Amino acid sequence: MSDINKLIQDLTLREKISLMSGFNSWYTNKIDRLGIPSIKMSDGPNGVRGDSNSGKSSACFPCAISIGSTWDMDLINQLGIALGEEAKVKDVDVLLEQLLKK
């Protein structure tokens, strides 16, 4: 059994439910007894908003439908890299993003 499957099996129903909701607007609940940390999330499609504690402003990219309408996969890739870099600077673990498929 993989570690993740064991971890999921070891979670109580209450703990599983708590992971589906946030501790607050930006962080997930942590499960200390299993070593599951709280992770930070942020909106992302047009810039990493963050929790306003980083002291850094956010980029403002066009909405996903506008980017997708360019059909420019190199541009879309560059946007993804820029969002990832911005998330890293703001200590964001999970970027809530819409995916554009080929």
Image: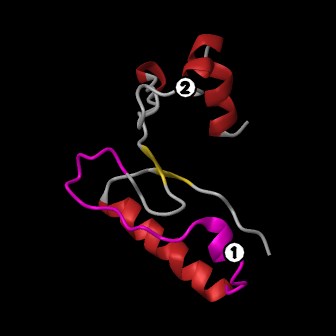
Element assignment for label 2: loop
Q: Residue, x 48% and y 71% (percent of image)? A: 61
Would you place residue 94 above or below residue 24 in this image? below
Question: Hey, which quadrant is residue 56 in on the image?
Answer: bottom left
> Residue lying furthest right in this view?
102
Residue 1 position in % (x across, y down): 73, 36
How far across and how far down the image is residue 49, in percent?
Answer: 39, 53
Residue carrying label 2: 21
Q: Which residues are magenta?
A: 50-72
The relative height of residue 77 versus residue 61 in the rendered view (above or below) is below
Q: Residues within 10 Å of mark 2 (few under 14, many from 20)?
A: few
Q: Which three-letter amino acid code belongs to the residue tagged 1?
A: Gly
- Amino acid tagged 2: Ser
Q: Which residue is mark 1?
A: 68
Check residue 54 for magenta coloring.
yes
Residue 21: % across, % down: 55, 25
Q: Nearer the viewer, residue 42 or 68?
A: 68
Q: Label 1 neighbourhood size at 10 Å, few (<14), some (14-19), many (20+)?
A: some
At 64% from the left and 37% from the top, the residue drawn is 4
Cα separation, mark 2 vs mark 1, equals 30 Å
Q: Which residue occupies the foreground of this view, 60 or 98?
A: 60
Looking at the image, do the residues carrying marks 2 and 1 touch, with CB atoms under 8 Å apart?
Answer: no
Horizontal side of 75 relative to 91 (left or right) equals right
Question: Most prominent secondary structure in the magenta stretch?
Answer: loop
